[in-house]
């Protein structure tokens, strides 16, 4: 025991917050590359290879349905990997989630099409998508905690925001790789094998992510909890989180509705809208998303600095109000069919996403004690992903099919922003919370994390 502690302490002396934040970012970027690669391919490839239909919109709808399956599996991953992370440690769990994601994505690269093996193709695709969802369900919470539990409250939003660069960076990589492949290859070659190259690249990215994650140490807060633990049966962290912190879980989930629904409309559904509805070329949508992601990357840490200075709630409230307004401006710009306007629409939407992302990591971490933090954070994060993110592209397609206008989708997105606004107004500011002092098991009335207005 003493030797293990000495080794851990020795290893930690060679790490720093920038190194830890970089390691978390690398892992989340790899996992989100894999996850978003599927989403982008669903809009461009899977609807043709795995879900053939006479109506292209029907094939796209079915492809997005399997995309949603990954979201549905995420709460399961949050429960399993969140429990493992609270019991065994943040670092080991993050390594496991990265391996699950990498293997499942790599196998998709070799999956035969519907034409080759019939209905078995979409079935296997759904199974692999489920594994992706389980892996991602435990990824974000651990990556954020690996950073937030190493630092203090003065710059927690800034450092905790670095793992949130993973979604735009991963999406940028996915869209970029597919854009390059689709640009240099004829349509037939891209559909036959070009898209598979992008999935095969995940193996290389996983190796890079694993090396970085093996380098960093476990968080001090978790090790302190483990050292103080007494022998004998222990309650399940998941049960403690749900029983003692269900209000915090729901509140945190609702604050993400505008961010999560908006992100998938601004970065994923926009490709379908531009290509299949507006009749523009595929490169226009992909380029707009890539430009938006490039803008989002520096915007997230800048908004995080603001959150450390003025608090989490003001940034949340501002982003939610912006979501409500931009929901309509977004489709007005897309309907011009002007490539520059399309880029402006996506950039504006992803700037709003950046403001949300700057706050989420710190705010969620500040709601739960160390004993249940991984479970609580992961459940809250992925509950919103299922209720808001997974359904957004499907609802968007259904609304357009029913009303024939993007403004119907704008109304839906504005409602999501209003839900986030309401939750943000109910939340208590947590900027000054000390993570080590948040009570365990049952939140006391005086606990800052327990106060919900």
Image (cartoon, rainbow, N blue to C red):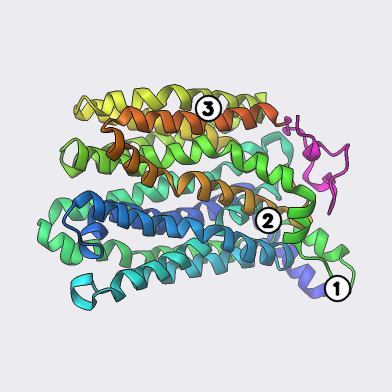
Q: Where in the figure is residue 417, as x and y percent of width and height? A: 51, 30
Q: Residue at 60% x, 36% y: name it.
A: 359
Which quarter of the image is occupied by the C terminus? top right
Rate crowding at label 3 as few (under 14), some (14 to 19) or many (20 or more) other CA atoms within 10 Å: many
Residue on which the image places disc 2: 374
Q: For residue 154, what is the image quadrant?
A: top right
- Which is more N-terminal, label 2 or label 3? 3
Identify the mark at residue 319; answer none if there is no mark.
3
Label 1: which secondary element: loop
Measured Cα–Cα span from mark 3 to mark 2: 25 Å
Q: For residue 232, what is the image quadrant?
A: bottom right
Q: Residue at 27% x, 52% y: name it.
A: 60
Rate crowding at label 1 as few (under 14), some (14 to 19) or many (20 or more) other CA atoms within 10 Å: few
Secondary structure mostly seen in the magenta stretch:
loop
Q: Where in the figure is residue 97, as x and y percent of width and height? A: 54, 65
Label 3: which secondary element: helix
Measured Cα–Cα span from mark 3 to mark 1: 44 Å
Measured Cα–Cα span from mark 2 to mark 1: 20 Å
Q: Where in the figure is residue 381, as x and y percent of width and height? A: 59, 48
Q: Residues in magenta?
A: 428-453
Q: Residue at 66% x, 23% y: name it.
A: 310
Residue on which the image places disc 1: 233
- Which is more N-terminal, label 1 or label 2? 1
| In this view, 272 is above or below 6 | above
- Which is more N-terminal, label 1 or label 3? 1
* Left/right of residue 20 with respect to residue 196 in the rendered view: right
Q: Is residue 418 visible?
A: yes
């Amino acid at each position: 025991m003493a030797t293990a502690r000495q080794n851990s302490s020795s290893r930690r002396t060679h790490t720093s917050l920038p190194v830890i934040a970089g390691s978390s970012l690398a892992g989340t970027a790899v996992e989100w590359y894999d996850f978003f690669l599927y989403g982008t391919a669903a809009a461009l490839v899977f609807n043709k290879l795995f879900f053939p239909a006479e109506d292209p919109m029907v094939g796209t709808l079915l492809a997005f349905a399997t995309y949603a399956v990954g979201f549905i599996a995420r709460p399961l991953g949050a429960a399993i990997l969140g429990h493992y992370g609270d019991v065994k440690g943040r670092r080991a769990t993050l390594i496991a989630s990265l391996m699950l994601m990498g293997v499942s994505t790599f196998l998709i690269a070799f999956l035969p099409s519907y034409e080759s093996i019939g209905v078995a193709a979409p079935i296997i695709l759904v199974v692999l998508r489920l594994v992706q969802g389980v892996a991602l369900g435990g990824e974000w919470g651990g990556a954020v905690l690996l950073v937030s539990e190493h630092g203090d409250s003065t710059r927690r939003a800034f450092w905790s925001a670095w793992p949130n660069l993973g979604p735009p960076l991963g999406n940028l990589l996915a869209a970029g790789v597919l854009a390059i492949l689709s640009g240099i290859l004829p349509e037939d070659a891209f559909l036959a094998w070009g898209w598979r190259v992008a999935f095969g690249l995940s193996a290389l990215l996983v190796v890079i992510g694993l090396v970085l994650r093996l380098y960093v140490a476990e968080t001090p807060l978790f090790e302190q909890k483990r050292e103080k633990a007494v022998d004998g049966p222990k309650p399940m962290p998941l049960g403690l989180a749900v029983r003692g912190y269900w209000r915090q879980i729901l509140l945190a989930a609702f604050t993400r509705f505008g961010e999560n629904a908006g992100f998938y409309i601004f970065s994923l559904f926009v490709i379908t809208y531009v290509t299949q509805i507006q009749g523009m070329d595929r490169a226009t949508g992909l380029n707009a998303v890539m430009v938006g992601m490039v803008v989002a990357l520096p915007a997230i840490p800048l908004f995080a600095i603001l959150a450390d200075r003025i608090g989490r709630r003001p940034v949340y409230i501002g982003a939610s109000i912006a979501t409500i307004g931009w929901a309509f401006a977004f489709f007005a710009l897309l309907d011009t069919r002007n490539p520059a306007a399309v880029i402006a629409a996506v950039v504006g939407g992803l700037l709003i996403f950046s403001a949300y992302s700057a706050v989420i990591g710190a705010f969620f971490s500040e709601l739960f004690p160390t004993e249940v933090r991984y479970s609580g954070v992961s459940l809250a994060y992925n509950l919103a992903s299922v209720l808001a993110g997974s359904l957004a592209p499907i609802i968007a397609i259904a609304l357009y099919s029913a009303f024939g206008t993007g403004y119907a989708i704008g109304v839906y997105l504005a409602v999501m922003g209003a839900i986030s606004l309401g939750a943000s107004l109910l939340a208590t500011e947590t900027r000054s919370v000390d993570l080590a002092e948040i009570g365990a098991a049952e939140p006391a009335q005086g606990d800052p994390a327990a106060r919900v207005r």
